[in-house]
Image (cartoon, rainbow, N blue to C red):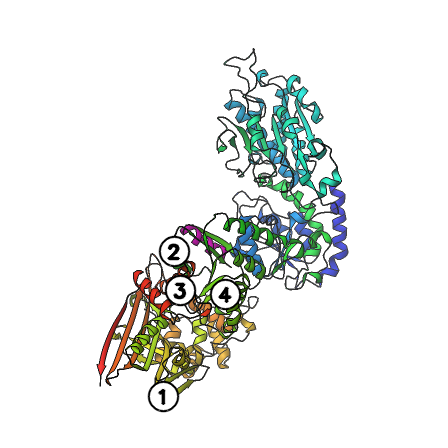
Amino acid sequence: MLRLVRNQFRGLTGCMCNLQRSHHHKSVMAIRREDVNVWERRAPLAPRHVKEITAAGYKVLVQPSNRRAIHDRYYEKAGAILQDDISEASLIVGVKRPPEDKVLPDKTYAFFSHTIKAQEANMGLLDDILQKNVRLIDYEKMVDENGFRIVAFGKWAGVAGMINILHGLGLRFLALGHHTPFMHIGMAHNYRNVSQAIQAVRDCGYEIALGLMPKSIGPLTFVFTGTGNVSKGAQDIFNELPCEYVEPHEMKEVSESGDPTKVYGTVISRRHHLVRKSDGVYDPFEYEHHPELYTSHFRSSVAPYTTCLINGIYWDPHTPRLLRRLDAQKLMKPSKPSASVTEGRPELPHKFLAICDISADTGGSIEFMTECTTIEKPFCMYDANQHIDHGSVEGNGILMCSIDNLPAQLPIEATEYFGDRLFPYIWEMLPSDATRPLDDEDFSPQVKDAVITSNGKLTPKFEYIGKLRERRESEQILKKSGMKRVLLLGSGYVSGPVIEYLTRDAGTQVTVASILLSQAEELAAKYPNTIPVMLDVASQEGHLESLVKDHDLVISMLPYNCHPLVAKHCITKRVNMVTASYLSPAMKELESSAEEAGITIVNEMGLDPGIDHMLAMECIDQAKADGCTVESYSSFCGGIPAPECSENPLRYKFSWSPYGVLLNTISPAVYLKDNQVISVPPGGSLMEATTPMEFLPGFNLEGFPNRDSTIYADAYGMESAHTVIRGTLRFKGFSSAMSSFIELGLINTDPCPMLEQTASPVSWKELLCKQLGLSSSVNNDSFEEAVFNQIGRDEYRMQTLRWLGMLNHEPVPHAATILASLTKHLEAKLSFDEGERDMIILRNDVGIRHPTGELEMKHMSLVVYGDPNGFSAMAKTVGYPAAIAARMLLNGELNTKGLVLPLTKNIYGPVLKRLQEEGLQVISKSTLSE
């Protein structure tokens, strides 16, 4: 039959060959290496399948693998190209999931994702796939019109599982004092091929037929659940023993008086053990639609007469369980002692000895199977009385084998078998373009209905996965009663201090929601009462809404443009909110809605803005109380590397993405100086507005204005001030070095096709030649002279470019824009090394005119160093203010409704005091003049 099907495949291939050749440039397929599990030696297609694909004019890439059971040479002989780089492929097929960091964007992938039940272990992968716009085809959901899987390893799971449990029975019998013929059978992977394994089973069967089984063991009975490929594969191995199949109702008789020279088997289907709770009748149609109305009597009608259960049924949470813990306790009750038993010929402690759960469905139809075993450690004993597993075949309990990758033990046969079933559908997968709408693809129902993600979203059929996740998250979040619940959006560098501060109170629980689940999980592992969840605010608004609903307070550490969306849900659900970002016009529009909802939204509660506001208002309010007027205000703040870590031309390092820092260099600025409004136009003039900062001279600082400073004359209530400036601090040299990027046109957000992922590699020299209108073949001296002229013949700027490797053939990172490429380059060159630390410097200078006519200059300096083994300075000075504000809201200390800034004493008073307790010490000095 298989030969006939294969010949049909070949005919189909021949007919399609010429048609498909024209799509060669789009239809490159890759077989990825399996790299998640050391035992995974299978492939989705065998060399003979690849040969037919390449013969049809397709290019097939195969990642080399010494672990793969079928040697690379056979794939190469079939026409495949062996190479690690598979980015050219539009279709990438594998067996199991790839690591998240190896998932390529905008591709069609096919593999077993194990996500359809919202399995927690694979939700990070699913999130990554959605983020990268991957079209995921899951083999598990490729079914025929009757709902039966058509692309699976099922048979070989059954074969391997049966071989393993026969081996396990030999070990268990030995532990109970019996040498049996099963000792001749090894684990499935110990055989070169299945034929060798079958021969070992036959040898065992031969000895059983000779009557060499210990008589005190009694007749052996095996129960197979299900009638699918898994069960049939297990039965194929069982059939090599001297076996007799009986009906389920005959199990009691054969288990008590059966022939010891044979083994007995029965196959259990739904009709044998499922009955309606109300009247004991089984209605197959009703069960399909309402399984919750049914129960199973397997525990009483079949299990007591079973030696070994081979479980291969799919379980759904609505369906009855086959066995529960209570059932296992009953099945472990000792047998009635026999008169013929002696010390050397012991009887079994109980009839029910072993379970091979091939379904490997944790907490499923076998309730007490809560963790899978592995190929390395295939067996454990479940002691139902103590409800524990112990990794041995000795002691009390039921032998359990529940390996979840059984076919990997017979990799060659499994690959051939699986490939035969997948191969007919490869032809329609090949033209798939993940950037096109799913409906534009010419997929059969078998393939289309197996597409879990496409175009950055779960497909309609699988949107339930998101709901399952939300329900599970909600249950986890609400599990502990009486807790104050905080939703922290973002898991970046400032989130650590927020969580650390809030969870000092045992009655506070923090949910960290991040697009990077691994980061959230790392934070949750460090702090008590912390729950990690994955959330992409931009694309999962419904999920955001459900999370907000379950919390008492939201802290948003997301980019500022995300805050309005978060705030709208906080307003709808009447949940307070804290953010460290500037109050944007979009947030300002929500003021009346927040007031009407009766909630508080605290904005600008970080360092700058945040601590700078509070220090300013503390000083200004006191001045007014003393009858003084404010004549000038200057505030400069910067996050920079500690001096000993600043040995690079920019005198700067990045602990987060440099994108915002770079983009800010071409921003405009406005400030007031001696009653004159000074405007700095956008496009690069900001770096020319840099001036030396004379305070704290040991740090050798420079500063440039930031945004529109003039609005703070009204905000701070200092309308009389003739000078108002807020700015950014850097070490001297920063602005000059940054100017070189501006002059060369590198702060450019326009799309750049030559730098896209699919483009050929480009060197910095080639890119700069393009920017300067030079031929890429220009000699090096002429090239450097042109660059030198473009940057104003500034030697320091030239040294900066040279130090950064931007005057040679070093490759430019692929990205959508030149600025994005520069961001990646600087992130790699100027990141903090292990053991290095950052620092922040905040300096406020306030000129106060006393009623006596004296002018007092108040100087407030905050210098904070990061801890190489703890929080960075920036994390502390942004995170702690936000956390303190959150604590005040949770404790009812802050009751002002609507949009709130930290400009009033009821906020800045307690916050500054508590920041001092966290070690953030402000040094204040004054100078007087006439």
Say above or below: 222 vs 749. Answer: above
- Residue that badge 3 annotates: 655
Does label 3 or label 4 sit earlier along the sequence? 4
Does the stretch in magenta take in 523? Answer: yes
Q: Secondary structure at mark 3?
A: loop
Q: Nearer the viewer, residue 551 or 786?
A: 551
Left or right side of 531 for 925 = left
Q: Main secondary structure of the magenta part?
A: helix
State the mark number for residue 598.
4
Does the stretch in magenta take in 357? Answer: no
- Residue that badge 2 annotates: 500
Q: Residues within 10 Å of mark 2 (few under 14, many from 20)?
A: some
Q: Are marks 3 and 1 in contact (CB under 8 Å)?
A: no
- Residue at 40% across / 64% down in the picture? 655
Bounds of the magenta span?
516-528
Residue type at the position of mark 2: Glu
Does label 1 or label 4 sit earlier along the sequence? 4
Residue 534 percent coordinates (x, y): 52, 56
- Residue at 38% across / 57% down in the picture? 501
State the mark number for residue 705.
none
Q: CA distance from mark 3 to mark 4?
A: 38 Å
Residue 754: quarter of image: bottom right
Residue 414 percent coordinates (x, y): 63, 41
Say above or below: 133 vs 927. Answer: above
Q: CA distance from mark 3 to mark 1?
A: 38 Å
User: Which numbered disc, 4 or 2, marks the residue closer to the eye?
Assistant: 4
Q: Pick the quarter of the image with the C terminus.
A: bottom left
State the mark number for residue 675.
1
Residue 302 percent coordinates (x, y): 65, 27
Does label 4 or label 2 sit earlier along the sequence? 2
